[in-house]
Image (tube, rainbow, N blue to C red):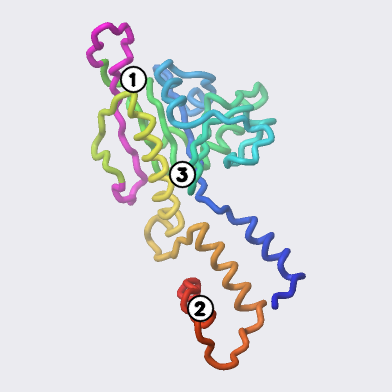
Amino acid sequence: MVDAALLPALFRSLDQIPVIDTHKVGIMYVAPGQTHELDILRNAHGSPAYTRFLEGIGRLINLRGQVDVYAGGLSSDEDGEYAYAWWDDIGQVLYHTATMMPSKPHDKYCVDKKRHIGNDYVRIVWNDSGIPYQFDTLATQFQFVNIVIEPHSLGAIAAFSNNIHENEYFKVTIQRASGMSDFTPVGDFKLISAEQLPLLVRQLSLLADCFASVFERTERDTKEVEVITNWRARLQKITTFKREKMPPPQTGGEIEGVIGQEAYRNFTATF
């Protein structure tokens, strides 16, 4: 039998490992003519197309008292009341959206915003500047992947419609750190409709965050390092506890029937 006094320590260690995969991705809006990081980070809003994009990329959550959704390190007292997030049964992503974070008068270098967005491995850049976005515009050591969105064209307006944005198209390009392999189906660029843009960019951001985290863990693909998922890490905690803290099973001869087959059903023994 297991000593019950040892279980709280095991449960505390398991509580520190999420049961799902979590991601955090930065989003920045670049207004017409902007090229400097401080001007970009100080933007308090974006274009109507940018706003529609945000509404499609995730769900708006209230950060105050939030316990059900991964908050990505955001505090409602410091980083604004709301944020966009997306989740399913096995993963959650929190978007650090610069335009939704307050620009504080005493923070002239936007340190509060940059400490989140600058530490993200992946940044989505909505570029309305009319100028090609430079990969190192945001000065940070975490320069891995930028997903750059730029307006491209307005499609034909359908009959009986007065919505000029109904068939709007955008150009999506991927900027990668030096030495990082191409890991997306985007190629040089992709043209995508406004309707499908949030879905594509969300999937790209999740893929990019996974890839960039491995790239960083392997020191830019120079070392062979095992990358362990949250589920695997939890399993390792349990098997270590079982090996070190639980007494070995008593053997009193071979047991027949279902109970005797239990050892063969223990898949954890192979990990």
- Tell me the mark number nearer the camera, choosing from 3 and 2: 2
Label 3 Cα crowd, 10 Å radius (few <14 / some 14-19 / many 20+): many
The tag on residue 258 is: 2
Residue type (three-letter) at the residue carrying disc 3: Tyr
User: 201 left or right of 83?
Assistant: left
Q: Nearer the viewer, mark 2 or mark 1?
A: 2
Which residues are drawn in magenta? 155-183
The disc, 3 or 2, on the residue closer to the chain's N-terminal end is 3
Q: Residue at x 58, y 40 (%)?
A: 69
- In the picture as drawn, the residue positioned furthest to the front comes out as 257
Location of mark 1 (residue): 130
Q: Is residue 105 left or right of residue 173?
A: right
The residue beneath circle 3 is 121
Q: Quadrant of residue 101?
A: top right
SS class, disc 1: loop
Marks 3 and 2, how far apart at CA: 49 Å
Q: Position of residue 115 (x, y in %)?
A: 58, 38
Q: Quadrant of residue 163?
A: top left
Tally the numbered discs.
3
* Residue 227 place in picture, x, y as percent: 45, 61
Residue 68 among those drawn in magenta: no
